[in-house]
Amino acid sequence: MKHLFILLLAGLLAGTAEAQSFKFDFTNRKKVKEGYIRITPADTFSTDRGYGYDLQPIPQKNSHTPFFFSVNVPDGNYLVTAVIGGKRSAGSTTLRGESRRLFYENVPTRKGELIACPFVINKRNKHISAKEDVKIKPRERHKLNWDDKLTLEFNGDAPMLSELTIERVDSVCTVFLCGNSTVVDQDNEPWGSWGQMIPRFFDTGICFANYAESGESANTFLAARRLKKALTQMKAGDYVFMEFGHNDQKQKGPGKGAYYSYMTSLKTFIDEARARGAHPVLVTPTQRRSFGNDGKIMDTHEDYPEAMRWLAEKENVPLIDLNEMTRTLYEAMGVEESKKAFVHYPAGTYPGQKEELADNTHFNPYGAYQIAKCVIEGMKKAGLPIIKHLRNDYKPYDPAHPDSMESFHWNNSPFTEIEKPDGN
């Protein structure tokens, strides 16, 4: 009887492991490689199937429109290898995942050329336990970050996919991002954040798990049980990045303030991370686009950045001073050019947009990309070991000399949103 139980348990474990590993063939070759699942245009996603084309109509043959592919998998980190390119034509492919997290951009392939693009992506849903969930906001209910699927976006001037493999990995170092709308994975154009751009610069030794959400302050993030959910996946050696301040400064009343509730909440993040053997990292809030008459950025965060610097020194926590780097970045761009890094667009630029968009807090993809590079330079200055996992194509960045807008090529996702994110 004991041996029968062991055999049954082994079978169940094998079935679970199998459910966390997939191999898909998107070609029309006559014979499918052993262990691979043939994907045809008829394979749209369904709960019963557990995988398939998703979110919008399947692209027609020789179409250059973006497409999405989803797979049901449990929470965790997954090594994804997308083999891009095809036998019959050249391509240019951008890879994103979940809520527009960027992993590869504008990868060219010649006719007949195949290139393997590996990356590690974090998948989660809102469930903490059988009795407890993250308290997500109404606007988050349809975010790809919070559902049961791992969703991948294939975009670019001519997106091409031949094979796709997905494999659960548990040993990869995870960087948990906690913050507000300047950090969050923005689902829709034209919004962007540094948290969804930064995965593009790291190899498969690092996985970013972005738990940030628009409108959150340090204490509301904790109250919504976002950190509690992150702790269910956290392990020794991981990192917890915290960027708050934009929304915290709007809280008034007894016990509120930079050296009161703000610092108390940040200390909770630090203690919880350390209790699990993870490394906390403090990130000062990004500057707003707030120029004075002298063409210099005016501070709008009161004493919140300074309070974070004080706490970092007191608790011996690495600090990334994004507040100062973004001051340098915006002043280097100048009053008018800096608008190109933010959501500043005339009426009619996007579907349903009847009025001008002029947001001086939230970035567009170009701005988010520049700030992600600032964060990386902050990692290097702080001496964080994870910088050894930077990809070979990352070049040192100086916020005093930002990339030109013309050098940044971004293919829009098919989904847009005119409503600005929560917070300011």
Image: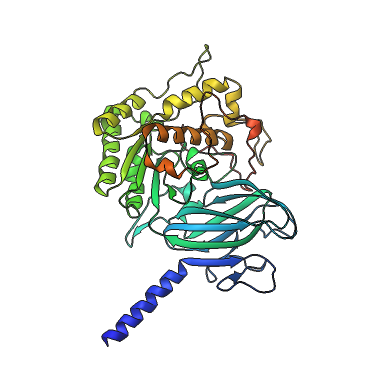
- Is 8 situated left or right of 361 in this image? left
Q: Residue furthest bottom?
A: 1
Is residue 26 depicted above or below 3 in this figure? above
The answer to which image quadrant residue 59 occupies is bottom right
Q: Residue furthest top?
A: 294
Q: Nearer the viewer, residue 134 or 15?
A: 15
Front residue (pair 294, 11): 11
Tell me where residue 406 appears, x and y as whole percent.
66, 32
Q: Residue at x 50, y 35 (%)?
A: 373
Q: In this image, 173 relative to 260: left or right? A: right
- Does the rendering let one see residue 283? no
Residue in the image at 29% along x and 37% along y: 265
Can you say which quadrant of the picture contains the N terminus? bottom left
Q: How many marks?
A: 0
The reply, left or right, for residue 61 in relation to residue 56 is right
What colour scheme governs how the chains and residues are painted in the rendered image of this protein? Answer: rainbow
Q: Position of residue 356 (x, y in %)?
A: 63, 30
> What residue is at 39 percent from the left and 49 percent from the top?
174
Toward the viewer: 226 or 156?
156
| Residue 33 seen in the current view | yes
Q: Quadrant of residue 88?
A: bottom right
Percent position (x, y) of residue 377? 45, 33
* Location of residue 20 in the rendering, given as x and y in whole percent from the top left corner: 45, 66
- Vertically, is 396 above or below 335? below
Relative side of 183 to 107, left or right: left
